[in-house]
Image (tube, grey):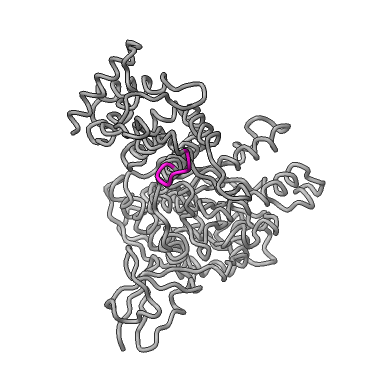
Amino acid sequence: MLEWARETLAYQVSLHSADSSVLDSDQLIWSLAIVCGSVEKIQASLREQDFLRQAFNCLFTTQTKIGSWRHYAPLFHYRQTGNAYCYVFESFAVLLQTALHSRAEFTRAVLRDYFERLLNLWQYARSTQVRIDESGKLVAWSSGHRTNNPAPESWATASVFSYAQALRRLAGIWTRESALLSLPRKVIYTSKEKAKADLIQRTRTWGSDKSLGDQIWSMFINPPKVEDPLEPDNHPIGHEFARSAILYGPPGSSKTTIVRALAGVIGWDFIELHASHFVAEGMPDVQRKADEIFSRLMELDRAIVLFDEIDELVREREKSTQGESDMFGRFLTTSMLPKLAELWDSRKVMYFVATNHIALFDRAIARSQRFDAVTFVSPPSFEIKINQLKRLLRDNFGKTMEFAISAADIEGTFANFGPTTTNADPLAKSNGILAKFALLRWDELAELAMRLTEVTRKSKVDKNTFSIALSKLRDGRWRTNREYVNYLRDQEYERRDCSMSNVWMVEGIDGNELSGRIRATPAGRAYTTALTDASKIRFAGYVVQPLGNGRLQLTRK
């Protein structure tokens, strides 16, 4: 059948290209639909693609001014009423459906060039509809096959609706693709495994009594999502699940990396927006640019959006840092509030704001139904940093060093920072230079490894040696007491919307246990709860052991 279809298609392309009086666009479209169904062969052959482009071009050159196609050779003959012809919507419904195959990127791309022609065909459908009730709201169609009985037909009506549904889906896909092209989309990870490894590493943070990894996984990764990229009108995120958060914490605490890795794990598109994108065309056009950006975001689905370094856009509206009225900040904050609410309501994307200065944020923008959580991201944990230091010393300097220092030694210096601390003073050995290691950025560890090789030849690093190496870091005067006072204070800003559900993946039980509370999902057995702290989850008769990253191990007592 495929060989026959390709031969017929070639014959009709020849007749159409020659503007023959015996061309038949019905035969062209049906053979084209059959050949386009063989997506594997099309994707692998440039020759086949060029041939099909010409076939589509031939097809649309015979479209009439009213948006339809004329009748060609009849399908068969009715003895009483005459010839029966192909119904154009039945033909085009089948053709468009070939473009809705998961691997039919080529067919979708070619059809996109004829979107206006396809809309014209839809306008023809609207002009031929028959109203079948007194209110005029119910409509149907007739194929026109039976000249003596033009009453509406169920199969003809179904053909028109099939065409309309396929066109709706394609229009949504093309709109999403257009929006992605106009936004700063980034491809960070080549595999979900690499993204998962980065997310696990970067969510192991310093000194928190709650697991950041558990929060990220149970709130944003584990909840089930509608996975159908070819249905743009789906809402991938359920009503009861989180889709937004403010991530805040000291510089270098991997906030941006966490969101990038989250997108990689889920497999969604990743968009990264900065304040510069909003002011790219100058101050007079800020409102228009903001409207344009958010209108594009509303056209996305299955995407993760990061608003990074936008502190100036969302700070408190009453006063600027100089104490004067800040029209710029006030406008952008006011402008963003309803747009964020619309994005939240759409349930099609997840969005995050990463900031170093949560205290400057406008209180209104962090409200529920704009952000589901305000989450503190502490710097990488002591163990993660020490392991990275060991790796850098080994790989870059050929040295193997052990560290006679603990997280408790570092945290013991935090007592030096309090309300009476002079914030502008730089860190000094007298008030605990060891504290610098807690807020040390990931990218500064390479320099610390180099400083360690300069200050000691020993294989064991004690507190004094570690302090000397830290004091030699070239960080200028930016890391003063203020950063440590803020670090200890800012943890109090954490909050979340407790009406949102979290999903934990459960191991250690079979399908019959706790069926009333734990359900089977494609990803495994899942428990839905408002709790984000694994240590507070209880099951009568079971020991609950947190495994990290949104997972629980249940063992019978």
User: Which of the image's four quarters has the C terminus?
Assistant: bottom left
In the displayed structure image, the side of residue 167 where residue 542 appears, left or right: left
Q: Position of residue 164 (x, y in %)?
A: 47, 41
In the displayed structure image, the side of residue 323 where residue 489 appears, left or right: left
- Residue ID at (73%, 32%): 284
Q: Position of residue 98 (x, y in %)?
A: 33, 38
Say above or below: 4 vs 521.
Answer: above
Q: Position of residue 359 (x, y in %)?
A: 67, 58
- Residue ID at (56%, 53%): 346
Give residue 326's quadrant in the image. top right
- Residue ID at (42%, 56%): 226
Say above or below: 492 vs 186.
Answer: below
Q: Is residue 419 visible?
A: yes
Front residue of 380 and 261: 261
Front residue of 439 and 220: 220
In the displayed structure image, the side of residue 24 where residue 154 appears, left or right: right
- Residue ID at (47%, 43%): 152
96 falls in the magenta region = no
Q: Is residue 248 visible?
A: no
Say above or below: 171 vs 494.
Answer: above
Q: Which residues are magenta?
A: 150-156
Residue with the most extreme front position: 80
